[in-house]
């Protein structure tokens, strides 16, 4: 019952380390987490069909699927970590950012993640493709398109992929499987996977982490620094302290000028 929550707490601890040790990235970590967190339950509606069925503290039925708060928290933490890695490995310093983020930009922030989710879900819904395989392939293609013309982004993306895959493997081998050695047999639909393992861990887990991190970092940077936000009045990126971010989010108003 608590296994998923315990696993998520490990990612929360890693997210907190990034937040504390990388003050220059704090706002981007917070906003990236908000941008992608709600995509976690969306993905779970696909995974529960043919990939895995974890146990939740509180089960939330969504159609024929079951999701939980753990799905949101996992995606929240993973997205922040992936974004932090991507910015950390970029050679160019962060660009100066505007003093305010208009409240009208929040729908863009919250809607961008689901927008990227649609191509991931389409093969499964339309053709019955295995959900995790479709996720890996579509995320990989989307990430390649985002970084194709930017050498710096390609380098940061490749390092982020390697770090995410290695981090996932270490999470299972060093931590999770020591407490729950039979977790793959209980939760995963192993018959639907490729059958390849890296030690005790199905290869799909590392591929999922690498492909997802490859997309999340560049996609977040594209939304924050690219044209999507500029359409809504944030044409130079983002700047605000964490308290201002949450105050603006709760009040649904523009950031105060600095």
Image: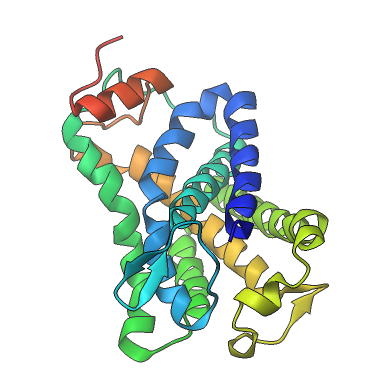
Left or right of 52, for residue 13: right
Q: Position of residue 29 (x, y in %)?
A: 48, 36
Q: Position of residue 227 (x, y in %)?
A: 27, 43
- Quadrant location of the N terminus in the rendered image: bottom right
Residue 39 is at least partly visible in this image: yes
Looking at the image, residue 180 lies above or below residue 82: below
246 or 103: which is nearer to us? Answer: 246
Looking at the image, residue 17 lies above or below residue 6: above
Left or right of 200, for residue 37: left
Looking at the image, residue 60 lies above or below residue 94: below
Q: Residue at x 53, y 23 (%)?
A: 24
Q: Position of residue 142 (x, y in %)?
A: 43, 65
120 or 86: which is nearer to us? Answer: 120
227 or 32: which is nearer to us? Answer: 32
- Quadrant location of the C terminus in the rendered image: top left
Residue 101 is at least partly visible in this image: no
Q: Residue at x 65, y 77 (%)?
A: 186
Looking at the image, residue 99 lies above or below residue 188: above
Number of marks drawn: 0
Q: Residue at x 52, y 43 (%)?
A: 83
Instruction: Check the image and name the residue furthest to the top.
Output: 258
Q: Position of residue 113 (x, y in %)?
A: 34, 54
What colour scheme has been applied to the protein in the rendered image? rainbow
């Amino acid at each position: 019952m608590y296994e998923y929550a315990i696993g998520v707490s490990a990612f929360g601890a890693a997210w907190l380390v990034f937040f504390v040790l990388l003050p220059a990235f704090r706002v981007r970590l917070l906003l990236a987490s908000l941008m992608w967190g709600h995509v976690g339950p969306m993905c779970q509606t696909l995974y529960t069909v043919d990939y895995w069925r974890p146990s939740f503290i509180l089960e939330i039925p969504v159609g024929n699927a079951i999701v939980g708060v753990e799905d949101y928290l996992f995606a929240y933490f993973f997205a922040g970590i992936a974004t932090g890695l991507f910015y950390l490995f970029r050679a160019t310093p962060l660009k100066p950012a505007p003093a305010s983020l208009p409240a009208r930009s929040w729908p863009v922030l919250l809607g961008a993640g689901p927008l990227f989710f649609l191509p991931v879900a389409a093969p499964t819904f339309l053709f019955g493709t295995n959900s995790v395989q479709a996720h890996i392939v579509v995320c990989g293609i989307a990430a390649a398109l985002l970084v194709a013309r930017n050498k710096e982004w390609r380098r940061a993306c490749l390092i982020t992929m390697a770090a995410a895959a290695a981090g996932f493997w270490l999470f299972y081998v060093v931590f999770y499987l020591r407490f729950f050695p039979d977790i793959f047999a209980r939760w995963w639909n192993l018959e639907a996977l490729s059958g390849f393992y890296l030690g005790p861990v199905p290869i799909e887990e590392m591929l999922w982490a690498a492909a997802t991190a490859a997309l999340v970092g560049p996609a977040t940077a594209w939304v924050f620094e690219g044209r999507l936000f500029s359409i809504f009045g944030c044409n130079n990126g983002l700047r605000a302290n964490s308290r201002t971010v949450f105050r603006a989010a709760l009040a649904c108003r523009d950031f105060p000028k600095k």
